[in-house]
């Protein structure tokens, strides 16, 4: 099956980035979110990002116009006319299961349903549908228009055809697909999130300031961004959720979320999206 039309569900940071990247890659794209305000923020973010890339010569006029002209919807009705759905809703199993149940009812039988989940089992998501062979994980990385990695995760029943389609779409979108096992955190977050969590433990135990800890990792380990700044970029609530999944599903205390991480989430200090986390951000 050739993919021509894509529905992206969720207009947040990941969803609008996926929609933008798909549109400039030549796909017909629709962006959906139940919250009209989220759609407005998402389209504004796309306009800002696309115009910035165009000013640097990284998008041509046709690609820019494609990004600026993405239609939107506040429900999943457009699923009836697409070849591929990429879900980028909040990292909450019950929300995702409900979305996939509805997508399964609305989308054409041949359509592939993909999730951008960073930690939830693709097998479990597929089980919420009558087409688990056509359900797959397509885990993009933030910021989507700039990051080249794409984790492709097969559920137990995901077909070879579905996997090949996800890889082909990812490559057309300029990504390097890497196949990951359907295991908690997949590859990237299985390695990355415990490292960030350990940096939070280091801060909690006063081994150094947030600036010192990030400087050590940037200058000593050549990381382009420090782990605490990266936590702010990811969202501390998302990071906490992933650590909870790793701790629960792998049953090893080395994945125990740092108490400081829990405190900051409880206080609403979620990182960039909240204006403050381990660092402060201008509004």
Image (spheres, rainbow, N blue to C red):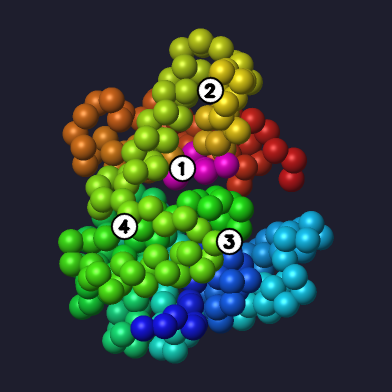
- Work out whether mark 3 precedes mark 1 in sequence or the reverse, and give the earlier one: 3
As drawn, the label of residue 237 is 1
Circle nearer the viewer, 4 or 1: 4
The residue pinned by badge 4 equals 153
Distance between the alpha carbons at the discs numbered 4 and 1: 23 Å
Q: Earlier along the polypeptide chain: callout 4 or callout 1?
A: 4
Compared with residue 128, is residue 259 higher up or lower down, i.e. above or below?
above
Q: Nearer the viewer, mark 3 or mark 1?
A: 3
Q: CA distance from mark 3 to mark 1?
A: 20 Å
Q: Pinpoint residue 124: horizontal percent, then vertical percent.
A: 22, 60
Q: Gap in Å between the C-alphas at discs 3 and 4?
A: 20 Å
Mark nearer the N terminus (4 vs 2): 4
Q: Choose between 215 and 250: the one closer to the eye.
A: 215
Q: Which residues are magenta?
A: 233-238
**Residue lying at 63% horizontally and 36% vertically, measured from the top left:** 276
Residue identifier under label 2: 221
Q: Is residue 280 above or below residue 77?
A: above
């Amino acid at each position: 099956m050739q993919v021509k039309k894509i529905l992206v569900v969720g207009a947040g940071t990941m969803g609008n980035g996926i929609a933008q990247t798909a549109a400039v890659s030549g796909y017909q794209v629709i962006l959906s979110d139940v919250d009209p305000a989220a759609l407005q923020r998402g389209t504004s973010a796309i306009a800002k990002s696309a115009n910035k890339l165009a000013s640097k010569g990284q998008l041509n006029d046709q690609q820019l116009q494609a990004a600026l002209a993405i239609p939107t919807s506040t429900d999943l009705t457009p699923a009836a006319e697409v070849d591929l759905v990429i879900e980028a809703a909040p990292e909450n199993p019950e929300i995702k299961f409900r979305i996939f149940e509805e997508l399964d009812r609305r989308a054409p039988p041949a359509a592939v349903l993909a999730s951008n989940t960073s930690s939830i089992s693709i097998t479990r998501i597929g089980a919420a549908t009558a087409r688990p062979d056509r359900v797959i994980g397509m885990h993009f990385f933030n910021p989507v228009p700039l990051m080249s990695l794409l984790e492709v995760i097969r559920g137990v029943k995901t077909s070879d055809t579905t996997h090949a389609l996800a890889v082909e779409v990812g490559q057309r979108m300029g990504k390097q697909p890497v196949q990951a096992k359907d295991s908690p955190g997949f590859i990237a977050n299985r390695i990355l999130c415990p490292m960030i969590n350990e940096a939070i433990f280091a801060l909690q135990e006063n081994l150094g300031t947030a600036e010192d800890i990030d400087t050590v990792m940037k200058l000593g380990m050549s990381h382009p961004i420090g782990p605490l700044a990266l936590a702010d970029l990811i969202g501390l609530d998302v990071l906490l959720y992933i650590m909870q999944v790793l701790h629960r599903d792998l049953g090893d205390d080395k994945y125990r979320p740092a108490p400081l991480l829990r405190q900051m989430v409880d206080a609403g200090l979620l990182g960039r999206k909240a204006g403050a986390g381990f660092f402060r951000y201008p509004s």
